[in-house]
Image (cartoon, rainbow, N blue to C red):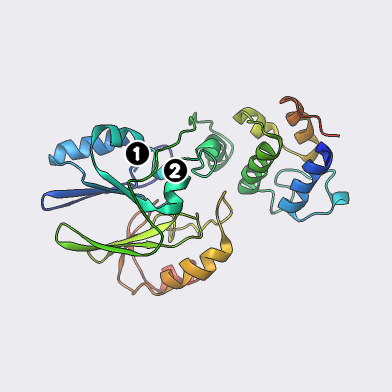
Amino acid sequence: MTNLEKYNKIFIGMFHKTEEELPGLKYRGIPLWDSIGHMDLVGELEEAFDIHMDTPDVLDFTSYEKGKEVLGRYGVTIE
Amino acid sequence: MEPVTESNCYVIREENSCMIIDPNDFQAIRGMLQKCNTMPKLVLLTHEHCDHIGGLNELRKAYPAIVAATEACSEGIGNKTRNMSRMMETFLYFKSGEKKFVHYPPFQCEKADLTFKECLCCRFATKELQLIPLPGHTPGSMVIRYDGCLFCGDYLLPGDKVVTRLPGGDGDAYERYAKPWLKAIPDGTWIFPGHGEPFQMNREVREFHEL
């Protein structure tokens, strides 16, 4: 599985969206991506990619696209 | 009440015995114990979230009390994700309306000294103590019944519906195990929650919590 597939799978499972619906997804943009959903999402991504995000980066992770940039700071390339 | 997370700790003195429920703030607890000239014999954990165990490590160093929790709670307190301390800075930031950043270092605790999976009935001092596992909010959640009162952790919080979406939370388990038990609490029972003021069970509480 590529990193992108892994990344997408987590988003799809977490927010009950299809792959086509992921681009443009934002924190607070849908009911399930609220503060609790966000913490859950970050936890899943940390486990999946074996990283530990600092809190400022957790808070900077505000969209599906931004998340890829944030993970890049930890050496994870999403493609 | 611990000022950062606003969680409640209960110190119960019964004759020459003292027990602590949810040791959140060691300094405050120690102050109270010194004021009452007593030492804890028993520490009970309603669940594994960090805002309810924040003072546990220091408490264990200072006093030889037995720590009792459900088996799942005992496992959870040793994991920074399951005890939520890993995400607490983020959680507190969100809770402040994304206005205030509070530094909250992640931590973990050693396992409990006494663990159980099923309801545990015993006596503390002269009164019956019941420890009732009720998973849902967390895998390790329990309700404590002592002297006719209930200490229910993060169930039945005044003004806040139960949260089952945090790591380890299980809505199905809540519906299957916790909710029926909470529903059966008689009106008039004093409830001492994990956050907020104590209250008595009544119709309004049932309606709010959909029991």
Q: Say what amino acid the circle numbered 1 marks.
A: Leu
Q: Mark 2 = which residue?
A: B77
Furthest-right residue in this view: A20
Q: Position of residue B152 (x, y in %)?
A: 38, 59
Question: Considering only vertical position in the picture, is B152 above or below B66?
Answer: below
Q: Say what amino acid the circle numbered 2 marks.
A: Ile
Among the two numbered marks 2 and 1 on one chain, the one whose residue lies closer to the N terminus? 1
Residue B28 has which mark?
Answer: none
How many numbered marks does the figure carry? 2
- Are discs 2 and 1 less than 8 Å apart at CB? yes
Q: Secondary structure at mark 2?
A: loop
Chain where mark 1 sits: B
Residues tagged by mark 2 and mark 1 found on one chain of the structure: yes
Q: CA distance from mark 2 to mark 1?
A: 10 Å
In the foreground, B145 or A60: B145
Q: Position of residue A65 (x, y in %)?
A: 81, 36
Question: Considering only vertical position in the picture, is A64 above or below B196?
Answer: above
Question: Considering only vertical position in the picture, is B155 above or below A34?
Answer: below
* Quadrant holding the N terminus of chain B: top left
Residue B105 visible? The answer is yes
Residue B6 visible? The answer is no
Toward which corner of the image does residue B93 lie, by quadrant? Answer: top right
Chain where mark 2 sits: B
Relative side of B183 to A20, left or right: left
Residue drawn where x is 53% and y is 33% of the image: B100
Q: Mark 1 = which residue?
A: B56
Mark 1 closeness class: few <14, some 14–19, many ≥20 residues within 10 Å:
many
Relative side of B142 to B177, left or right: left
Relative side of B188 to B171, left or right: left
Q: Secondary structure at mark 1?
A: helix
Q: Position of residue A34 (x, y in %)?
A: 65, 48
Toward which corner of the image does residue A74 lie, by quadrant? Answer: top right
